[in-house]
Image (cartoon, rainbow, N blue to C red):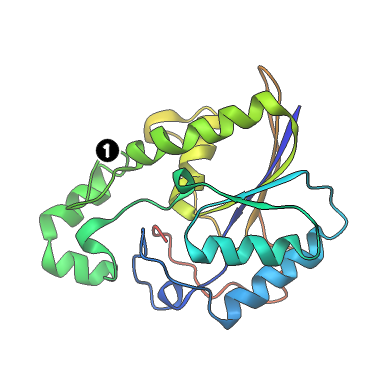
Amino acid sequence: MTLLYLVRHGETDWNRTMRIQGHSDIELNDHGVAQARRLGARLARWRIDRAIASDLVRAQETARLALGDRAIPLELDERLRERNFGEWEGLTREEVEARDPEGARRWREEPWTFRPPGGESLADVARRALPVVEELREEGGRVLIVSHGGTLRAILRHLLGWPDGSGPKLFLFNTGLTVIRLGPERVRLERLNDIGHLEIEPAVLDPREA
């Protein structure tokens, strides 16, 4: 049996200003550091056997703060990176609408398969990220995974039986905690996007890739 602790990274300045991050390597801001430390305090008594993070700095920083003083090496896996948004990275949604209205329309209407110029679709993200989870299913233990909103949504759709963009729209808060128990044939969702460790409302509520 494998228990996954899935966490979206803490807040960055680009989250706060609603800019699309994708593969851009943006570090946590002070609020994001505080969020990650609160998550770490919450997880302090939880058993964690292994920790894996996206190699982007915002995920690495969140994971290290969440692990606290544990003597667990942090593994970095580029397959857990956020979706590559290509030429749109650094832009706001409004700027995308103004510069590329046809692309913005397709992003709204074909969210699973549309690729921004020079970027990836969510289907592409699923193809690279899902093998990480399936490998862990075979290994067992309790694993902390720190990644990104788009990547975690792709993983959750697979595990919960909503492939190819079907099912409800999901938005994951910064440092939101999702806990999933994986068996050989069964999946049990125990927590979804839990932010009980945060004492204030998250600063970013806009449901975009970040």
Q: With 71 as the anchor, is 155 left or right in this view?
A: left
> Measuring 64% from the left and 31% from the top, which residue is drawn there?
136
Q: In the rendered image of this protein, does residue 160 appear above or below residue 27? A: above
Q: In the visual, does 21 lie left or right of 64? A: left
In the rendered structure, which amino acid carries the disc numbered 1? Answer: Thr
- Element type at mark 1: loop
- Asked whether, in this view, residue 75 is left or right of residue 105, the answer is right
Estimate the x, y position of residue 122 in percent, counting from the top left.
35, 42
Residue 119 point in image, percent of width and height = 24, 50
Residue at 62% of width from left, 75% of height from top?
33
Asked if 75 appears above or below 88 in the picture, the reply is above
* Residue designated by label 1: 113
Question: Closer to the camera, 193 or 133?
Answer: 133
Query: Residue 147: x percent and y percent?
Result: 53, 53
Q: Pointer 1: residues within 10 angstroms few (<14), some, or many (20+)?
A: some
Displayed quadrant of residue 24: bottom left
Report the quarter where the N terminus lies: top right
* Point 27% across, 38% down: residue: 113
Q: Which x, y percent locates residue 178?
A: 66, 48
Judged from this view, the residue extending furthest toward the bottom is 30
What is the tally of numbered marks visible in this picture? 1
In the image, residue 13 sits, relative to residue 88, either above or below, namely: below
Tell which residue pokes out farthest to the right in this image: 45
Left or right: 192 as drawn, with respect to 54? right
Between 157 and 210, the one lying in front of the other is 210
User: In this rendering, is residue 122 above or below 19?
Assistant: above
| Residue 101 found in image quarter | bottom left
In the rendered image, which quarter contains the C terminus? bottom left
In-front residue for pair 199/210? 210
Outermost residue on the top side: it is 185
